[in-house]
């Protein structure tokens, strides 16, 4: 996994990791202890829920550790403003439909596809990353291939 993240993104991940490893784990351990005191664990819904919460928290901790350890830090001063990259905004045209739209490229953490804030790890984001005005790219998406032209970097 190659996660291109800003220092701010990584700090948010580290904060969440610290919270989950200390506060959240302690809360869940207390829930398990209280639920276990209610008797037979095989038919104890509260205990089973606490165990499920523990697994969910532990899975999230593993995910956060992986995100942090595989992150490539993107620094603002290293971003080429003449080409598309993280925090770039551009007007693009979908060639086959003759449809134009304004998109923003963002890290995976900051992406919001519904508002055309596209992750640089997505198919469209990978195709547009590093491109300049006038470039036409072919996007290989699960739904099929399509071409996009960079009309303007905003």
Image (cartoon, rainbow, N blue to C red):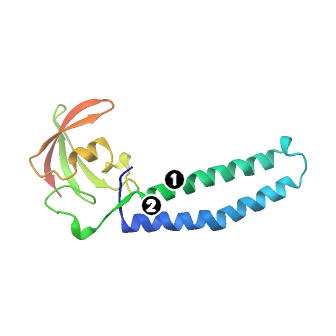
Where residue 130 sits: x, y (%)?
18, 53
What residue is at 83 percent from the left and 58 percent from the top? 34
Secondary structure found at label 1 = helix
Seen from the viewer's position, the closer of residues 85 and 68 is: 68
What residue is at 26 percent from the left and 68 percent from the top? 76
Seen from the viewer's position, the closer of residues 34 and 114 is: 34
Residue 14 located left or right of residue 107: right
Q: Indicate whether 74 appears above or below 41.
A: below
- Quadrant where the C terminus is found in the figure: bottom left
For the image, the number of numbered tags is: 2
Residue 116 located left or right of residue 57: left
Among numbered discs 1 and 2, the one appearing first in the sequence: 1
Dot 2 crowding, Cα within 10 Å, few <14, some 14–19, many 20+: some
Seen from the viewer's position, the closer of residues 153 and 119 is: 119
Where residue 149 sits: x, y (%)?
14, 42
Query: In the rendered image, which residue does mark 1 sit on?
Result: 63
Where residue 69 sits: x, y (%)?
44, 60
Dot 1 crowding, Cα within 10 Å, few <14, some 14–19, many 20+: some
Q: Indicate whether 12 appears above or below 44.
A: below
Asked which quadrant contains residue 61, the reply is bottom right
The answer for how far apart the CA atoms under marks 1 and 2 are is 9 Å
* Residue 73 disc label: none
Where residue 94 sits: x, y (%)?
19, 38
Query: In the rendered image, which residue does mark 2 sit on?
Result: 68
Residues under numbered marks 1 and 2 in contact, where contact means CB atoms less than 8 Å apart? no
Seen from the viewer's position, the closer of residues 64 and 114 is: 64
């Amino acid at each position: 996994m190659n996660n291109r993240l800003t220092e701010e993104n990584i700090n948010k991940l580290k904060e969440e990791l610290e919270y989950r490893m200390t506060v959240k784990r302690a809360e869940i351990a207390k829930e398990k202890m209280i639920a276990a005191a209610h008797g037979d664990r095989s038919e104890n819904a509260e205990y089973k829920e606490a165990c499920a919460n523990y697994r969910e928290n532990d899975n999230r901790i593993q995910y956060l550790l992986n995100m942090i350890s595989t992150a490539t830090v993107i620094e603002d001063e290293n971003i080429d403003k003449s080409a598309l990259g993280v925090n770039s905004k551009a007007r693009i045209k979908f060639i086959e439909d003759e449809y134009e739209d304004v998109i923003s490229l963002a890290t995976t953490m900051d992406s919001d596809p519904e508002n055309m804030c596209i992750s640089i790890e997505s198919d469209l984001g990978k195709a547009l990353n590093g491109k300049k005005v006038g470039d036409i790219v072919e996007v290989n998406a699960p739904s099929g291939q399509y071409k996009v032209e960079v009309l303007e970097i905003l």
